[in-house]
Amino acid sequence: MTEQDQSSELKDLDARLRKAKVTADGAAGRTPSHRSGRNGLGFAMRLGVELVSALAIGVGIGLLLDYWLETTPWFMLLFFILGSVAGFLNVYRAATGIGQGVGYRPARTGDRPAADKAEADRRTGV
Amino acid sequence: MATQGHSPLAQFEIKTLIPLKLGETDVSFTNSALFMTLAVSIAVMFLLLGMRKRELVPGRWQSMAELSYEFIANLLRDTVGAEGRKYFPFVFSLFMFILFGNLLGMIPYSFTFTSHVIVTFAMAIVVFIGVTILGFVKHGMHFFSFFVPPGVSVVLWPLMIPIEIISYLSRPISLSVRLFANLTAGHTMLKVFAGFVVSLGIVGGVLPLAFVVALTGLEFLIAFLQAYVFTILTCFYINDAIHLH
């Protein structure tokens, strides 16, 4: 094999590698996977805090509103309930792998409307 | 001193090393600040010295530096996608700061600054505000559609929107409390069990001693894991802000 051949072969390989890399990058780049956030222990540690923090925020908002409007304890009670619902929602989202996104489905990934629609349909049961 | 030294919570005490005053505010250099400085300088040294030779076949240190870089780069690409690349410096610094803070805390007699909720909350609120601004910059007023779950009838909006807002506001709290609580609980537990070793003597102390050894291993795991969880949630939040539903 001459040196000329070798270098052109290498160039060819280089071009193909680059192409493959771009494709792989593109594919990986467009599919935010929720799997990576869900490996075992790291995932388990998230759940408990999610529940409590939303409750704390809810009660906090309620107490502030009560303080301003002098309606103790009604806003606190209302936001206690809303806060616990939000807490359960957080846990549900984390557990079903919808990620941290507010909303009921994975955040849209830009250029996959078909898959997104299928996902939405599956969730709403259409 | 004796009782203070044995308290499992004494390790979290803030001690002023160099008293400083800026007007009326106390800006003393404390042990917390010292360990933050240490964490930053060790992280910088680890990366700079590790990459100094830039060998094609990496040595041990270079390998570790490259590994941590690639770990976060892949994490960001998996969760956010190609658009996430410009947030890499921020996410990587955050990860290294927390990781080195946690690991420095594992050295006996050192101070764990991530076991103070104000430190973790400051980091979480920076992430939260940054991500919110990012969402506004990218989407303008359309950002508010974030709080309206798709496919919910208008009748339920007055109920759903407050819930979504609470859920959104709870992010910095859960982010900061998770890191702080794990670190504080772990270090307190280590100290408590270490106390048992002394009080139970040679015969009875073997069991708690074995437990302390196991716990130390677990604490190292948690040091990594919590840095990782903080980072991946930051990535999730960035992803949410970039790709609204």
Image (cartoon, coloured by chain):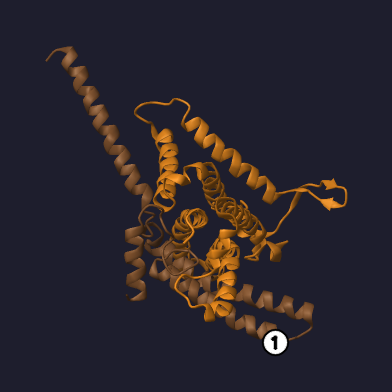
Tell me where residue B22 appears, x and y as whole percent: 84, 46
Towards the viewer: B200 or B243: B243
Image quadrant in which the N terminus of chain A is located: top left
Q: Is mark 1 on a helix, strand or loop?
A: helix
Label 1 resides on the chain identified as A
Chain shown in brown: A
Residue for point 58% across, 51% down: B134
**Looking at the rendering, which quadrant does residue A77 occupy?**
bottom right
Tell me where residue B48 appears, x and y as whole percent: 52, 31
Residue for point 33% across, 76% down: A125
Q: Which residue lies furthest to the left in this view?
A: A1
Chain shown in orange: B
Tell me where residue B59 appears, x and y as whole percent: 38, 31
Residue for point 36% across, 62% down: A116
Does B63 appear above or below B173? above
**Kind of residue sitting beneath label 1:** Trp
Towards the viewer: B28 or B94: B94
Task: Please rate how many residues cluster around mark 1, counting C-alpha atoms within 10 Å: few if below 14, some from 14 to 19, many from 20.
Answer: some
Image quadrant in which the C terminus of chain A is located: bottom left
Towards the viewer: B127 or B229: B127
Residue B17 can be seen, yes or no: yes
Residue B112 can be seen, yes or no: no
Q: Which residue lies furthest to the front in this view?
A: B154
Relative to A121, B50 lies left or right = right
**Label 1 sits on residue:** A74
Q: Residue furthest right?
A: B23
Tell me where residue A55 appears, x and y as whole percent: 59, 76
Relative to B170, A124 lies left or right = left
